[in-house]
Amino acid sequence: VGAGLESSIYKNLAHAGTGIESSIYKSIAHVGKGLESSIYKNLANVGIGIESSIYKNLAHVGAGLESSTYKNLTLVSTGLGSSNYKNLAHVGTGLESSIYKNLAHVGTGIESSNYKNLAHGGAGLESLNYKNFAHVGTGLESSIYKNLAHVGTGIESSNYKNLAHVGAGLES
């Protein structure tokens, strides 16, 4: 956690800060601004200007993210046109959630859907209780799941294996 930290080479490692280089591991949470995407399944890409990774169940969160063309891929930004893919989540501003598995809800005031591998991105979103859930934003309540990435400020830690706590003033 911090600025300009070099990534460690560990499984389920959380990279938090600004300008952190991504590590190449499964279930890694990349958090910050300008983070390069890692190439792993169920990877949460969070920040501004993050390039999309090409993986299944990948959550793309931020502004101006380029969509990837994959199954169960989350396309997140503002004013994105829908892509024609199975279980694809289209997220922007004030978009109503779709009811699909592996759907990512990202933006402002978007209601969460109850689905596995759902990515919540934005401000004040309530966490869903799902495995491999990525929580991104400010003041998000932690979910109680394995491989859960907590990202933001003042996020309460969950008691789970491989849990990444990222931000300022996080309890371990």
Image: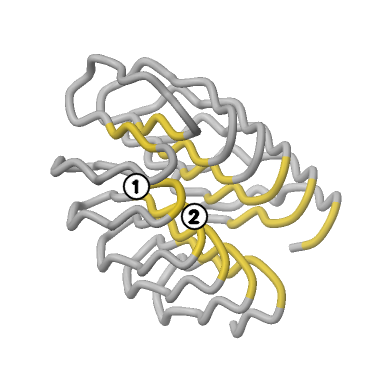
Earlier sequence position, callout 2 versus callout 1: 1
**Residue 100 falls in image quadrant:** top left
Query: Is 157 displayed left or right of 171 in the figure?
Result: left
Query: Is 140 displayed left or right of 172 in the figure?
Result: left
Whole-percent x, y for residue 141 in the image: 43, 76
Instruction: State the quadrant of the N terminus.
Output: bottom right
Q: Residue at x 59, y 47 (%)?
A: 30
Whole-percent x, y for residue 10 in the image: 59, 52
Which secondary structure, mark 1?
Answer: strand
Q: Residue at x 44, y 48 (%)?
A: 27
Q: Residue at x 50, y 41 (%)?
A: 61
Residue under pointer 2: 122
Whole-percent x, y for residue 93 in the image: 43, 42
Query: Is 131 displayed left or right of 109 in the figure?
Result: left
Q: Residue at x 55, y 27 (%)?
A: 65
The amino acid type, in three-letter code, at marker 1 is His
Residue under pointer 1: 105
Query: Is 157 displayed left or right of 148 in the figure?
Result: right
